[in-house]
Image (tube, rainbow, N blue to C red):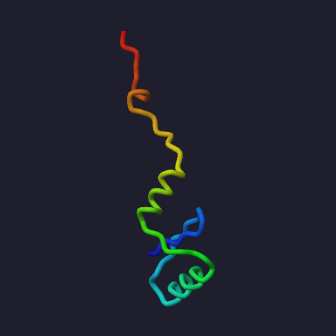
Amino acid sequence: MKILKRGDDFRKVPEVTINDVLIIRNLISQGWNYCSKQIYKDAMKNDTPETKETKKSKNVKDKK
């Protein structure tokens, strides 16, 4: 699996068959560049909003 980047767009492309390699070469000629997994993970981490609630806020019960 190769990760390609163009601007802010990422694309994961399999690299199993010869046709897959030809598709990657075509994308490279169209201006896509190889990208490392770390750059991809950092970009995906920054794009996703964090909507996690803490356990305390979920499990708070009034004790009498």
Q: Quadrant of residue 9?
A: bottom right
Residue drawn where x is 40% and y is 15% of the image: 62
**Residue 64 position (above or below residue 29):** above
Residue drawn where x is 43% and y is 27% of the image: 57
Image quadrant where one finds the N terminus: bottom left
Q: Quadrant of residue 25?
A: bottom right
Residue drawn where x is 50% and y is 40% of the image: 51
Residue that lies at the very extreme toward the left in this rendered image: 63
Image quadrant where one finds the C terminus: top left
Residue drawn where x is 45% and y is 35% of the image: 53
Residue that lies at the very extreme toward the right in this rendered image: 30
Residue that lies at the very extreme toward the top in this rendered image: 64
Residue 46: where, in percent of width, then height? 50, 51
Residue 8: where, in percent of width, then height? 59, 62
Of the pair 17 and 31, the residue shown nearer to us: 31
28 lies left or right of 55: right
**Residue 12 position (above or below residue 28):** above
**Residue 33 position (above or below residue 46):** below
Of the pair 25 and 56, the residue shown nearer to us: 25
Residue 22: where, in percent of width, then height? 54, 88
